[in-house]
Amino acid sequence: MDTLDVKIMGREFRLACTTEEKPQLLRAIGVVDTRMENIRQGGKAMGVDRIAMLAALQIAHDTIREQGEQKNSVMGLDSEVLERKIQSIASAIDSALEATGPINDSLF
């Protein structure tokens, strides 16, 4: 298992992944980081945990909408496989957030 040091909204995280997973994980991190930054720049001041939840909901909504358009296939993946991958990424983000300690909402 390799480790990958990444930044999401300026915060550093260390994630465990296989060499084969790295390219896809980096793309996923890019999607999450971009979505979170867009929400943060959208106006209201809110904490990182709230921004992360809104980004996760938006990404999930986009995925579900695309599933309907592609009849249970997203980018050639079975919807169940995709859901497991999303859950794995969400778990990695949750673990990283828990490891960083309490979030100070007043900073955002």
Image (cartoon, grey):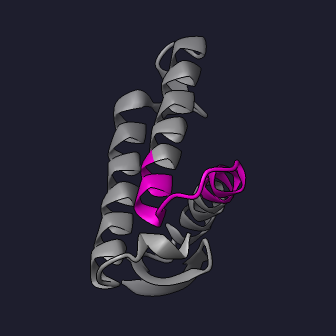
* 23 relative to 107, above or below: above
* 62 relative to 101, above or below: above
Q: Nearer the viewer, residue 75 or 29?
A: 29
Residue sitting at x 47%, y 64%:
48
Q: Quadrant of residue 29?
A: bottom right
Residue 83 horizontal side relative to residue 60, left or right = left
Residue 105 horizontal side relative to residue 45, left or right = left
Is 63 covered by the magenta stretch?
Answer: no
Q: Quadrant of the C terminus?
A: bottom right
Residue sitting at x 30%, y 61%:
91
What is the x, y in percent for residue 106? Answer: 47, 73
Q: Nearer the viewer, residue 8 or 54?
A: 54
Instruction: Write the start and end of the magenta stretch as one range.
Output: 34-53
What is the x, y in percent for residue 60? Answer: 47, 35
* 70 relative to 37, above or below: above
Residue sitting at x 50%, y 77%:
19
What is the x, y in percent for residue 3? Answer: 44, 87
Query: Could you tell me what secondary structure mostly forms the magenta stretch?
Result: helix
